[in-house]
Image (spheres, grey):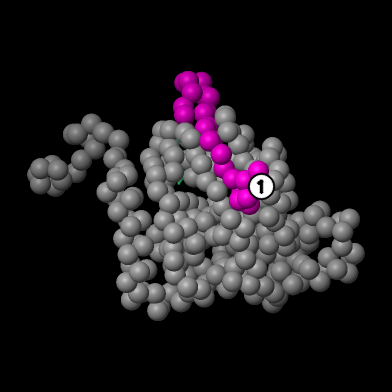
Amino acid sequence: MSHHYLTIENVDKLYHTAGGSTQVLKNVNLKVNKGEYISIIGHSGCGKSTVLNIVAGLTGASSGGVILDGAEVTAPGPERALVFQNHSLLPWLTVYENVALAVDKTFRHSKTRAERQDWILHNLALVNMSHALHKRPDEISGGMKQRVGIARALAMEPKVLLLDEPFGALDALTRAHLQDEVMRIQNELHNTVLMITHDVDEAVLLSDRIVMMTNGPAATIGEVLTIDLPRPRDRIALADNPRYNHYRHEVLRFLYEKQRKLEPLRPRREAQAPAAEAAGA
Ligand SMILES: Nc1ncnc2c1ncn2[C@@H]1O[C@H](COP(=O)(O)OP(=O)(O)OP(=O)(O)O)[C@@H](O)[C@H]1O
């Protein structure tokens, strides 16, 4: 048996639609150690969410599979918690109740009512949301909703945390603040994390390794970059760090030179502005 905690092995994925079938993923292989923070980056539509959904057990691989802590993934389960870009809190429940729902479900047999209550409060404190326990999602900001989503995921004590562009919908300052929070929590808890991102700086700042995917169809892992920067990491100090900038450059080079995304061809006359045509574009 593999000594890796999470193994994605020879995963192919075909989607069958009325128009025929498309091979989205081809031969995706990745081995993740316990406590590693992995980012997956690649152009839009290459298949990042499909990889994450297969690990989550939300969709099956067409061939190959996923093994987590020695067991094959065949269905969704609480040991793989997901956080999406668009907050998935239940709007009629308070912040506390949203986390309580997951905690009560996961620990109803293993923790007493009082222990569960402490655990909910503990996880909401971890993301600095203790001040808003009784607010409903429409009474808090987007960043706060993401904090609650993260608290809910952490509170399930998952074996792997699956983050699908968790900061994607946030403004730059809120995003930076939340990235710092996630780094702080990661330094404390050492979760195993798979995170999809489109943000090169975010990937370098947060990750132990960055998995770079080729363009689809039949996308696969093109390169894996190990980020050897000491933790805790400080975004301001790193801005002038040559190694940080080297990693950034490597990811940009992969995305914009090696895997340059070509826009689909459009009819020349209608699609291009006169100025662009005059410039010979
Ligand atoms: N259920 C489905 N049925 C058919 N095709 C699908 C389905 N889900 C995804 N696809 C297609 O598979 C490809 C990969 O989609 P996926 O969402 O995994 O990409 P992605 O890299 O996460 O994209 P983005 O960065 O834009 O979120 C796309 O071409 C998409 O249209």
Residue 27 in the image, given as x and y percentages of width and height: 48, 35
Which residue is pictured at 14% across the width and 43% down the height? 281
Residue extent of the magenta highlight: 1-24
Which residue is pictured at 61% across the width and 51% down the height? 4
Residue 135 in the image, given as x and y percentages of width and height: 71, 68
Taking the magenta stretch, the answer to whether it contains residue 12 is yes
Which residue is pictured at 54% across the width and 42% down the height? 51
Which residue is pictured at 72% across the width and 60% down the height? 157
- Label 1, on which residue? 68
Residue 104 in the image, given as x and y percentages of width and height: 82, 58
Give the main secondary structure, helix, strand or loop, of the magenta stretch. Answer: strand
Residue 29 seen anywhere in this rendered image of the structure: yes
Residue 138 in the image, given as x and y percentages of width and height: 64, 62
Residue 134 seen anywhere in this rendered image of the structure: no
Q: In this view, does 108 lie above or below 124?
A: above
Mark 1, secondary structure of its residue: strand
Which amino acid is tagged 1?
A: Leu
